Amino acid sequence: MLFQGQDVSGRPPYALARRGIGRTFQVVKPFAGLTVLENVVIASFLRHPRRAQAEAQAWRVLETTGLADRAHLPAASLTLAGRKRLEIGKALALEPSFLLLDEVVAGLNPTETDRTMELILGLRADGISILIVEHIMRVIMGISDRLVVLNFGQKIAEGAPGDVARNPSVVQAYLGKEQE
Amino acid sequence: MPADLRAAVPDAPAAPPGGAEPILEVQHLSKVFGGLTAVNDVSFRLAPSSAATTRPPGAGCCSRART
């Protein structure tokens, strides 16, 4: 596995973070006993060893992710949508050039999903490359430049969203085979 | 997976559009959890831009991979 031309296979998470790779988890795992701000500050320490600078960076991330008004609440008090945003915030605090997102809209309602899509598009506009694992087609089609479709672990299609959506193998995998 | 679902997907990773240098290149990646093969010999390249992988619901999702 090559990241920016360098083999990163098997590298530990902290080394990947230092290289510029951030990631979120489908099942969110905040430090529940800490505040929202403290959760993000921990990640900010990677680039900013001094607390004041780490906190300043964390506040910028909280503004980006729409969590600034909940900064001093315990992370455990957030809704699922809030905890998903905190997950993205923790990854952004690493100041990544490449972001891996694992089903960040799973369990969100349509409004929350739309806000998360806007957030992802904003990050992309800021120059962050993003790889998302997702199976909600509305989300995928709305934010992606390129798709790789897996079915039971095997790649069945790859290409631009419009082309992939018309691919017979993809249609069959999602909707089943047409009766003859 | 039915054999006819395996479309004409090239074995070699496709080049990113526009000839850009890939930010990520995955070659023949497989991941096995216990007896379950969650990712089976997958290769792809990503240009520096947004991208996504997706899979049909129930087609080997993470919750199954973690059993």
Image (tube, coloured by chain):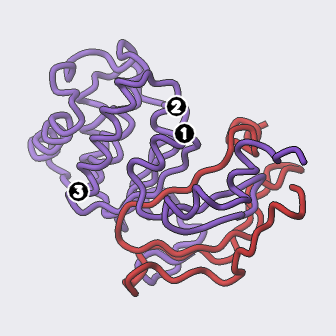
Which numbered dot is residue A63? none
Secondary structure of the residue carrying numbered label 1: loop
Q: Mark 2 = which residue?
A: A106
Q: Which chain is red?
A: B
Across and down, in percent, residue A53 comes to: 10, 47
Taking B38 as reference, is A37 left or right?
A: left
Q: Residue at coordinates 76% horizontally, 69% vertically from top-left?
A: B7
Amino acid type assigned to the residue bearing label 2 in the image: Ala
The part of the image, by quadrant, that contains residue A75 is top left
* Front disc: 2 or 3: 2
When the figure is inspected, residue A85 is found, relative to residue A14, above or below; the finding is above
Measure the C-alpha gap from mark 2 to mark 3. Answer: 30 Å
Q: Mark 3 = which residue?
A: A47
Asked if the residue at tag 1 contacts the one at tag 2, i.e. Cβ–Cβ closer than 8 Å, the answer is yes
Amino acid type assigned to the residue bearing label 1 in the image: Ile
Viewer-nearest residue: B10 or A119: B10
Across and down, in percent, residue B23 comes to: 41, 74
Q: Residue furthest top?
A: A77
Q: Mark 1 = which residue?
A: A136
Give the drawing colour for chain A: purple
Measure the C-alpha gap from mark 2 to mark 1. Answer: 8 Å
Report the quarter where the N terminus of chain A lies. Answer: bottom right
- Output the chain of dot 2: A
Count residues near mark 2 (Cα–Cα under 10 Å), then give few for <14, some for 14-19, many for 20+. Answer: some
Secondary structure of the residue carrying numbered label 2: loop
